């Protein structure tokens, strides 16, 4: 059991946090968020968070369970819209376009800002149809040959093609967990997103499958902006260039990953990364 005294200390340190430590803006932002609050009914889950997501960067979001990482991530492609009690305020934009503006179609937004979940969730369809699903509903191909190109290209980018090329008609669910997660990544890539959000994408995978996904994340950075929530500090250190530390719904500190893990500026960040709290 975590010490009650320690918890109280953290609560009071937390109460004193007025501003995020570190630079929350970047020179080349893909997405910008400013003064974001999120409520579930009367309960506030995110407090005044401002954070940019840069082009071609992997930003890791870390912090104790329940600190709001998934909630914040879900704001970035309006997945919270699907939760009736959830209310979001503040400003959020993608390439300068207001995410909550009247002209923005959330379905199109979710193609531009794709999401990979904790548990691989392939559709009950063939490997091919899993990847072809998005391009079909968004009308991204004119004929079967074009669709084949998108499916094969996406499977290649997700590092899965060689393992499945002889069984594209097999069910997605017949793959191993790690392969299923790469299939879900291929499905996300197939609609040409600009940003990929990943919520603890490796937590259901073994170490080898995890290593494969981490390599893939590094390769994907060349073409996409990536925000990854992880409870593994080692993973954050391995895959990200910037790290954001959340605590009880506030963004405590953000900065270069090396800096956050070797020389954090805030006491709460330090306590978390040294394992004293979490
Ligand atoms: N659908 C929901 N309805 C009500 N409260 C929620 C819901 N999802 C999350 N919360 C609450 O919001 C807070 C942040 O949760 P979450 O974003 O899931 O944190 P994390 O991903 O960091 O573990 C928690 O207090 C959690 O209980
Ligand atoms: Mg979560």
Image (spheres, helix red, strand yellow):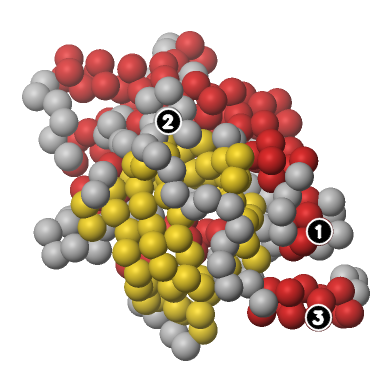
Q: Is residue 201 above or below residue 157?
A: below
In the foreground, 273 or 234: 273
Could you tell me which secondary element the residue under label 3 belongs to? helix
Could you tell me which secondary element the residue under label 1 belongs to? helix
Q: Is residue 92 visible?
A: yes
Tell me the CA gap for discs 3 and 1. 14 Å
Disc on res. 8: 3
Instruction: Say if mark 2 contacts mark 3, CB within 8 Å.
Output: no
- Residue 106: x and y in percent read 24, 56
Classify residue 184 by image quadrant.
top left
The residue positioned 28% from the left and 31% from the top of the image is 192
Classify residue 15 by image quadrant.
bottom right
Q: Is the C terminus in the top left, top right, bottom left or bottom right quadrant?
A: bottom right
Tell me the CA gap for discs 1 and 2. 30 Å
Which residue position holds label 2?
Answer: 56
Q: From the viewer's perspective, is 99 left or right of 102?
A: right
In the foreground, 210 or 223: 223
In the foreground, 169 or 148: 148
Which residue position holds label 1?
Answer: 271
Q: From the viewer's perspective, is 132 left or right of 238?
A: left
Task: State which tag comes first along the sequence, 1 or 2.
Answer: 2
């Amino acid at each position: 059991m975590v010490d009650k005294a320690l918890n109280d200390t953290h609560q009071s340190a937390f109460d004193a946090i007025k501003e995020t430590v570190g630079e929350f803006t970047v020179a080349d932002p893909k997405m910008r968020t400013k003064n974001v609050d999120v409520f579930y009914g009367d309960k506030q889950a995110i407090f005044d968070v401002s954070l940019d997501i840069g082009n071609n960067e992997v930003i890791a979001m870390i912090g104790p369970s329940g600190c709001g990482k998934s909630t914040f991530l879900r704001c970035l492609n309006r997945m919270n819209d699907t939760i009736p009690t959830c209310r979001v305020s503040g400003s959020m934009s993608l390439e300068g376009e207001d995410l909550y503006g009247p002209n923005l179609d959330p379905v199109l937004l979710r193609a531009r800002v794709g999401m990979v979940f904790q548990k691989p969730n392939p559709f009950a369809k063939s490997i091919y149809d899993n990847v072809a699903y998005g391009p079909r509903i968004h009308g991204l191909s004119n004929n079967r040959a074009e669709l084949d190109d998108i499916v094969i290209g996406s499977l290649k980018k997700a590092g899965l093609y060689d393992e499945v090329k002889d069984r594209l008609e097999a069910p997605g669910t017949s793959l191993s967990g790690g392969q299923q997660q790469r299939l879900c990544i291929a499905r996300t890539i197939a609609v040409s997103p600009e940003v990929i959000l990943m919520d603890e994408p490796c937590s259901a995978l073994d170490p080898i499958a995890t290593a494969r996904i981490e390599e893939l994340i590094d390769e994907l950075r060349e073409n996409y902006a990536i925000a990854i929530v992880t409870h593994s500090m080692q993973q954050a250190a391995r895959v990200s260039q910037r790290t954001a530390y959340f605590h009880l719904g506030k963004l405590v500190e953000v900065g270069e990953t090396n800096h956050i893990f070797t020389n954090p500026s805030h006491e709460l960040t330090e306590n978390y990364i040294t394992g004293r709290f979490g």
